[in-house]
Image (cartoon, rainbow, N blue to C red):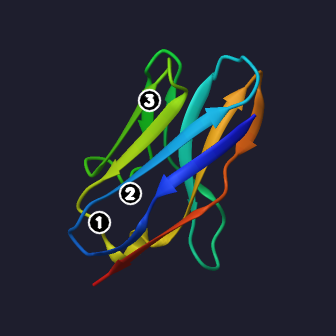
Amino acid sequence: VQLQASGGGSEQAGGSLRLSCVASGRSFRLDSMGWYRQAPGKSRALVARVTFDGVTNYSDSVKGRFTISRDNDKNTVSLQMNGLKPEDTAVYFCNAVIWGLNFWGQGTLVTVSS
């Protein structure tokens, strides 16, 4: 299973960015897909995730600003990030859980300037 992320980049505070990730490989069902982020000097932490059945959960820091969505047919997950803040600056990682195993995409950098 391979995860390919796209999107990210630089934006000013208050702006928006969108991240997308597609899973490819052998036939599988993705139990959940989501996004984690790692800021400089900090551990990787959950941003948002969505289960196969569409149940979502978000970190408190992004609730009301970020929206996660997925397309089960296309094995894709997207993260719409609105109202960006400088503290959202981090490397964002796509994650998929398959058969209880975690798979990770390459990180994509999001930089938010004040």
Query: What residue is shown at x 66% (from left), y 17% (from top)?
Result: 29
Across and down, in percent, residue 6 comes to 50, 54
Horizontal side, residue 76 vs residue 38: left or right: left
Question: Residue type at mark 3?
Answer: Arg
Question: Residue type at mark 2?
Answer: Ser
**Residue placed under numbered mark 1 in the picture:** 84
Vertical comparison of 112 with 73: above or below? below
> Mark 3 or mark 1, which is nearer the start of the sequence?
3
**Counting other residues with Cα less than 10 Å from the Cα at mark 1, is it few (<14), some (14-19), or many (20 or more)?**
many
**Residue placed under numbered mark 2 in the picture:** 61
- Which image quadrant is residue 9 in? bottom left
Question: Residue type at mark 1?
Answer: Leu
Across and down, in percent, residue 90 comes to 52, 70
> Mark 2 or mark 1, which is nearer the start of the sequence?
2
Quadrant including the N terminus: top right
Residue 105 or residue 34, whichever sits in front? 105
SS for tag 1? loop
Query: What residue is shown at x 43% (from left), y 20% (from top)?
Result: 54
**Residue at mark 2 to residue at mark 3: CA–CA distance:** 21 Å
Which marked residue is nearer to the observer: mark 1 or mark 3? 3
Across and down, in percent, residue 96 comes to 65, 35
**Residue at mark 1 to residue at mark 2: CA–CA distance:** 11 Å
Residue 86 or residue 77, whichever sits in front? 77
SS for tag 3? strand
**Residue placed under numbered mark 3 in the picture:** 70
Which marked residue is nearer to the observer: mark 1 or mark 2? 1
Horizontal side, residue 28 vs residue 87: left or right: right
> Mark 3 or mark 2, which is nearer the start of the sequence?
2
**Counting other residues with Cα less than 10 Å from the Cα at mark 2, is it few (<14), some (14-19), or many (20 or more)?**
few
